Amino acid sequence: MATPKQPKHNLLDDTTKELNEWTGEAKAVEIHPLRMFSEVFDRHTKNDADAIFIAGTKATTPPLAEVSDAPVKPWLFSRVLVVLLVTFSLLLLLFYAFKNERVLPGLLVMGSLTVPFSLMIYFFEVNVFKNVSILSVLEVFLLGGVASMVATMFLYTLIPTANGTALWSAALIGLIEETGKLLIIAWFINHLQLNYIFNGMLIGAAVGAGFAVFETAGYGMDYGLVTLVIRSWQAIGTHTLWSAMVGAAVVFAKDDYRPLTTQTVLRPKFMRFYGLAVLFHALWDWHVPFAWLDIFYIHQLILIAGGWVVILVLIEAGLREVRMLRQAGIPAEEHAFLPLP
């Protein structure tokens, strides 16, 4: 009698299955980056872009019955990225070709802004509930970014670190900075009464993007354009992603859409994804004692890939949440437009 074939397993499937179990579903998540970004190279009109940017108002927030649970295919973020990259490139031209040092402040701003801001737009597109306006996101980006830095600096005064690259120091830095951002992310999510995974990821990404922009601008001012460029491309997998994880964790901690409390943050769903963000941050800052990992930024590229795997699993969990809400028949008034005062 033939032995039935055992299903094949690989590291990616095992990882996504474990992460997905944390969100409440015990199966692997299929990762299809080409499908997700399939519309990036399609032709889109200005009206298509306008339709995305006007989401989140009283007139444009769809009822829950009309919220799509189809695989997300964001594209507008790529157009924003191109505009910012061209602007940064023109500033570099002015600086190097025409020796115009007056453009240095602009280089610092645009170099630090390009990737985090584009990523924030990505999460804005991914929010299929379309219940948070771009104006609200920009306010969270600016105010939340600065406020999270203030919270972090305050925590640093309470918990001094050596600010080094040893594992223990990197772990402490990751814990402090992710906690500082957590405080602001949780405040915005509570204040705006946001309840969905996609909402949490968007608010987290906006706070993290703001934090990344201001931090990178400071490093660029201290260490020059080479550091600015390196930190800029690496931003594709740092603060914005980590904070999106934290935002999702905050939503997981909420009890039946009620405000977050100190008790609910002890829930395993929250602790796992918050701890994961801290771990990614710590591993990023850690000077790994393997020289080969420094070749072509292998260390950072591994962490970037890992961070995106977590984000894609959370996106799948967000789509599953849409389906569950429909099946549960959540009243329309619970899926309301939530303006930012």
Image (tube, rainbow, N blue to C red):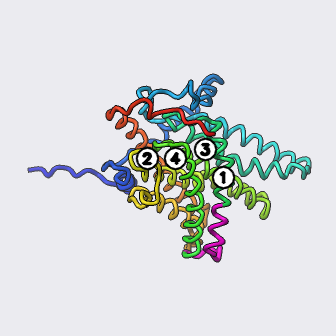
| Distance from Cα at disc 1 to Cα at disc 3 | 12 Å
Do callouts 1 and 2 mark residues in contact (Cβ within 8 Å)?
A: no
Amino acid beneath label 1: Gly
Amino acid beneath label 3: Met
Which structural element holds mark 2?
loop
Residue of label 3: 120
Q: Nearer the viewer, mark 4 or mark 3?
A: 4
- State whether residue 244 is above or below residue 292: above
Determine the residue positioned at 66% across, 41% down.
Answer: 138
| Distance from Cα at disc 4 to Cα at disc 1 | 15 Å
| Distance from Cα at disc 4 to Cα at disc 2 | 18 Å
Q: Which segment is the magenta one?
A: 151-167
Which structural element holds mark 4?
helix
| Distance from Cα at disc 1 to Cα at disc 2 | 25 Å
Which structural element holds mark 3?
helix
Badge 2 crowding class, 10 Å Cα cut-off, few under 14, some 14 to 19, many 20 or more, is few
Residue of label 4: 201
Question: Residue 258: which disc?
Answer: 2
Amino acid beneath label 4: Met
Badge 4 crowding class, 10 Å Cα cut-off, few under 14, some 14 to 19, many 20 or more, is many
Determine the residue positioned at 60% across, 63% down.
Answer: 177
Residue of label 1: 145
Among numbered discs 1 and 2, the one appearing first in the sequence: 1
For the C terminus, give its image quadrant: top right
